[in-house]
């Protein structure tokens, strides 16, 4: 008997985050990270969608039927080794400099992974840890 064929995932379609303030999140994802706001279906609850390459970020405004906004797992210390999601950028060091120039504190980095990729970690307005990573040079 042969095993059934696996499901083949092609890419991450979207990541959904529950947020407290859509405008603060729009400023972070669009104005800071350069994503484009997208049209979204007329759901019965507030939210926004943003495009990041082939991936979308779906924000849901916190409401009675949503989960709580922000990281809902008790974290003693935020770090690069906690729950997070990552976006590829051209230059992690340049991204860190822009964040620092705008007065946005870094969670960690910039630091080189063992393979040479550069990682920078920052919080979005709801405390989600977002990694900005650039590929190894060479």
Image (cartoon, rainbow, N blue to C red):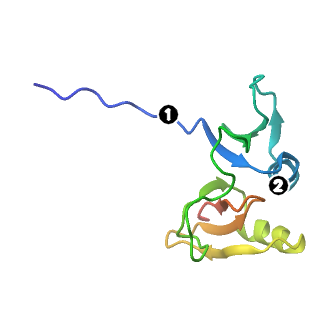
Q: What residue do we see at 87% from left, 73% from top?
A: 103
Measuring from the top left, give residue 62's x and y in whole percent. 73, 45
Badge 1: residue crowd in 10 Å (few <14, some 14–19, many ≥20): few
* Residue at mark 1: 10
Badge 2: residue crowd in 10 Å (few <14, some 14–19, many ≥20): some
Can see residue 15? Answer: yes
Measuring from the top left, give residue 120's x and y in whole percent. 67, 69
Q: What residue do we see at 89% from left, 69% from top?
A: 102
Measuring from the top left, give residue 104's x and y in whole percent. 82, 70
Give the mark toward the camera: 2 or 1: 2
- Dot 1: what SS? loop
Q: What residue do we see at 83% from left, 74% from top?
A: 100
Query: In this rendering, would 59 be left or right of 23?
Result: left
**Above or below, comparing residue 100 to residue 57 in the picture:** below
Identify the mark at residue 28; answer none if there is no mark: 2
Can see residue 52? Answer: no
The disc, 2 or 1, on the residue closer to the chain's N-terminal end is 1
**Above or below, comparing residue 87 to residue 75 in the picture:** above
Is the Cβ of the residue at disc 2 closer than 8 Å to that at disc 1?
Answer: no
User: Which quarter of the image is occupied by the C terminus?
Assistant: bottom right
């Amino acid at each position: 008997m042969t095993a059934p064929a696996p499901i083949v995932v092609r890419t991450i379609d979207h990541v959904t985050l529950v947020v407290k303030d859509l405008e603060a999140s729009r400023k972070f994802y669009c104005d800071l990270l350069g994503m484009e706001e997208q049209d979204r279906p007329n759901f019965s609850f507030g939210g926004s969608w943003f495009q990041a390459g082939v991936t979308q970020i779906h924000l849901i405004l916190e409401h009675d039927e949503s989960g709580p906004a922000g990281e809902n797992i008790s974290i003693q210390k935020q770090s690069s080794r906690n729950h997070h999601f990552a976006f590829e950028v051209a230059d992690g060091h340049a991204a860190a400099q822009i964040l620092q120039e705008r007065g946005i504190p870094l969670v960690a980095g910039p630091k080189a992974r063992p393979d040479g990729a550069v990682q920078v970690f920052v919080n979005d307005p709801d405390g989600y840890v977002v990694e900005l990573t650039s590929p190894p040079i060479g």
